[in-house]
């Protein structure tokens, strides 16, 4: 895995869960490029690349494909406004196609679901009260304005907005004490985790340990193991949430309902290992899902982007301009 996955590396996501999130601001994305007849030779902001064949497709073609899915995973560089706008363009087109997507966001923990429901449904909850009750500063951090357009879209369109992330105190507990000890804590049962299987997948383990050693070298094996276990709990918790939404939508027998649109950092979807594979396992492989990895594009990132493409980091690679803050940092 490339060390260039910066703001969206799995390692940085684990650390962010323990210490808080940092911002990577950006601007509005350009329109996607038209479909190419040959595999991509040059990377340009606006391209949506099908990693199966290296060809660019239009946003309209992407939407046509997405309409056949039960789950769509969007992986971002955190606090990147280009990526927020890309997600909105996809959600808008799903809405225009007569669908009611369910938006699940990593930026909110499970404990904030009641206030999310009240706020989106139009109850008289002031914006500042919403942020306070949702624990925005403690659970995510950075300017809410970056992500507010996604929340506003769900509110305007009366869509379900779901808190995807396990509570940060639960993840910190695992990072501090390890998974085995955390299982005996009252919070584990409080969040209905006592019957959950936290799967230790060898490929997943290798990716995360490589990230940890590259970005946080010099740590003890015990520290890396606890951070790894915290990562497993986050991804398994997100998968649990996605699966509950898929099952709920299936029960509606309503062709207009869905898909689930999962919006997280790219580290949670890359190579299908973190969340998508766990969702598939929980549904015995019987799920239609696709991954879209969003990344800043610049001449200096050509090698990194080539690696993402050749390694099939996701089903689609959606390129956006670099933000005003410049290239994403290698490690956080």
Image (spheres, rainbow, N blue to C red):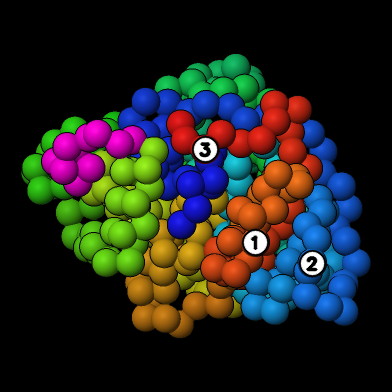
Coordinates of residue 103 in the picture (x, y in percent): 61, 52
Q: Which of marks 1 and 3 is nearer the N terminus?
A: 1
How many residues crowd mark 3 within 10 Å: few (<14), some (14–19), many (20+)?
Answer: some
Membership of 224 in magenta stretch = yes
Residue bearing mark 1: 306
Up the image or down, 61 lies above or below 114; here it is: below
Q: Residue 330 carries which label?
A: 3
Coordinates of residue 17 in the picture (x, y in percent): 38, 34
The Cα–Cα distance between marks 2 and 3, rounded to whole angstroms, is: 24 Å
Q: Which of marks 1 and 2 is nearer the N terminus?
A: 2
Element class at badge 3: loop
Residue bearing mark 2: 41
Q: Which of marks 2 and 3 is nearer the N terminus?
A: 2
Q: Can residue 103 be seen in this view?
A: no
Tell me which corner region of the image, top left, top right, bottom left or bottom right, holds residue 117: top right
Q: Which residue is drawn at 33% across and 43% down?
A: 212
Q: Which mark is residue 213?
A: none
Q: Which residue is drawn at 42% across and 81% down?
A: 285
């Amino acid at each position: 895995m490339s060390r260039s996955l910066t703001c969206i590396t799995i390692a940085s996501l684990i650390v962010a869960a323990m210490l808080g999130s940092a911002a990577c601001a950006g601007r509005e994305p350009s329109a996607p490029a038209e479909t190419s007849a040959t595999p991509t030779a040059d990377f340009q902001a606006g391209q949506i690349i099908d990693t199966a064949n290296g060809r660019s497709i239009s946003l309209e073609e992407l939407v046509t494909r997405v309409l056949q899915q039960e789950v769509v995973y969007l992986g971002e560089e955190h606090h990147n406004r280009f990526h927020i706008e890309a997600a909105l363009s996809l959600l808008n087109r799903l809405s225009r196609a007569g669908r009611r997507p369910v938006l699940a966001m990593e930026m909110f923990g499970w404990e904030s679901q009641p206030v999310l429901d009240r706020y989106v449904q139009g109850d008289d909850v002031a914006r500042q009260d919403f942020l306070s009750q949702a624990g925005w500063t403690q659970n995510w951090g950075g300017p809410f304005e970056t992500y507010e357009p996604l929340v506003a879209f769900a509110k305007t369109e009366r869509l379900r907005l779901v808190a995807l992330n396990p509570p940060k105190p639960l993840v910190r507990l695992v990072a501090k004490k390890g998974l085995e000890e955390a299982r005996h804590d009252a919070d584990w049962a409080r969040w209905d985790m006592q019957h959950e299987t936290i799967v230790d997948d060898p490929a997943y383990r290798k990716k995360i340990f490589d990230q940890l050693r590259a970005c946080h070298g010099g740590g003890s094996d015990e520290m890396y193991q606890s951070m790894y276990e915290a990562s497993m709990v986050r991804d398994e918790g997100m998968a649990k949430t996605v699966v509950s939404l898929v099952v709920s939508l299936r029960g509606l027998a309503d062709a207009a309902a869905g898909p689930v649109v999962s919006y997280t950092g790219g580290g949670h979807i890359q190579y299908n290992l973190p969340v998508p594979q766990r969702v598939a396992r929980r549904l015995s492989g019987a799920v239609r899902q696709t991954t879209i990895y969003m990344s800043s594009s610049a001449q200096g990132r050509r090698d990194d982007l080539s690696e993402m493409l050749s390694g099939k980091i996701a089903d689609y690679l959606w390129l956006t301009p670099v933000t005003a803050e410049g290239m994403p940092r290698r490690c956080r």
